[in-house]
Amino acid sequence: MKKIPAFIFYIFLLTLTIERSYGQTQTGLQEADSFFLNKNWAAAKEKYTSHLGDDSSNSQVWNRLGYCNQNMGLYSEAIRDYNKSLSNNPSPQIKNIVFYRLASVYSLMNKTEDATDWLVKSTMGGYNSLNDLDSLETFKNLRASSNFREIRQKIYEIIYPCSRNPRNRDFDFWIGDWNCYRTGTNVLSGYSHVEVMSGGCAILENYTSTQAYTGKSFNYYDTATGKWEQLWIGSGGPGDRQRYLNGEFKNGAMHFTYETTSPQGEKQKGTFIFYSIDKDTVRQYQDITDDNGKTISVTYDLTYRRKK
């Protein structure tokens, strides 16, 4: 029988020991995770602690250990563990969770400034924390702080970046529910519901005539051009679409320009204006130019009266 060289036998034993140790480690982590998912924080903490030691680089385990301590009311230990997690190059997903949990702990400790800083970091990482901020017991101390309105506004503006640009509010005078009349008369033409959409990045109009006609317009401020745009799509088919450009609010009105094509195939230009008469009245006027600018025809002229 051949003898196995000593160094090969040594490698074999070493590999067997490592694999056995790895298997035990994985089993221990599975047990810890099971306790964690069942919210048995004390048992999970014991298992995680025995796995970690002082030099583990497993950011997820440090994160979970911190959450165990947080739920056991051991806030200083939780902060230590969360910082350990952050120091071990966590994935963006874990990092963001840790940011959020640090915000939670500092809020529970009534350290408003620290809680706000971590909540801002979490929100900038993509965590939509506004609903939690408004409702969770965890953030009760933040809600009770004297500057909560400013804190909430800061979080809101991160989640909804269009709200930070005042130009996105130029067209807000048109928002509401309206009865639409032919200007200068009490002849009702239709109804319009105008609302903010996409976190304040656009305004949506839903128009319904007194007949069968309907249409929608999408209105938004384009930061690249510094102008507003509107895209109208009506129920009249492919030809019932129009794009309005160069929107600018000035002298109490939103001014657009547009181009279209006549039935004869000639290019035509026109203006499209929304006059903010008062908080309950908006006049919508559109014209078109023919004969190379010699003739201006009014396409329509409506007055929107806010429903009471």
Image (cartoon, grey):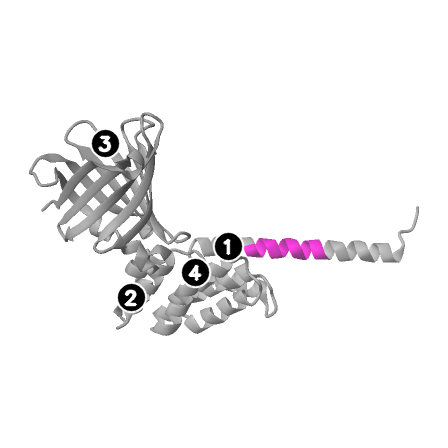
Local crowd at mark 1 within 10 Å, few (<14), some, or many (≥20)? Answer: many
Of marks 2 and 4, the one in the foreground:
4
Marks 1/3: CA–CA distance:
56 Å
Q: Is residue 252 magenta?
A: no
Marks 4/3: CA–CA distance:
40 Å
Question: Which amino acid is tagged 2?
Answer: Lys
Q: Which residue is mark 4?
A: 124
Marks 2/4: CA–CA distance:
22 Å
Prevailing SS of the magenta stretch: helix
Vertical arrangement, residue 75 with respect to residue 214, above or below: below
Q: Which residue is mark 3?
A: 214
Vertical arrangement, residue 301 with respect to residue 149, above or below: above
Vertical arrangement, residue 194 with respect to residue 21, above or below: above
Q: Earlier in the sequence, mark 4 or mark 3?
A: 4
Secondary structure of the residue carrying numbered label 1: helix
Local crowd at mark 3 within 10 Å, few (<14), some, or many (≥20)? Answer: some
Q: Earlier in the sequence, mark 4 or mark 1?
A: 1
Q: Which residue is mark 1?
A: 33
> Quick one: 6 or 269, which is closer to the camera?
269
Q: Which residue is mark 2?
A: 140
Question: Which amino acid is tagged 1?
Answer: Asp
Of marks 1 and 3, the one in the foreground:
3
Discs 1, 2 touching: Cβ within 8 Å: no
Q: Residue 161: image x %, image y %?
A: 37, 57
Of marks 4 and 1, the one in the foreground:
4
Secondary structure of the residue carrying numbered label 3: strand
Residue 99 is labelled as none
Residue range highlighted in magenta: 18-29
Q: Earlier in the sequence, mark 3 or mark 2?
A: 2
Q: Residue 82: image x %, image y %?
A: 49, 67
Q: Is residue 20 magenta?
A: yes
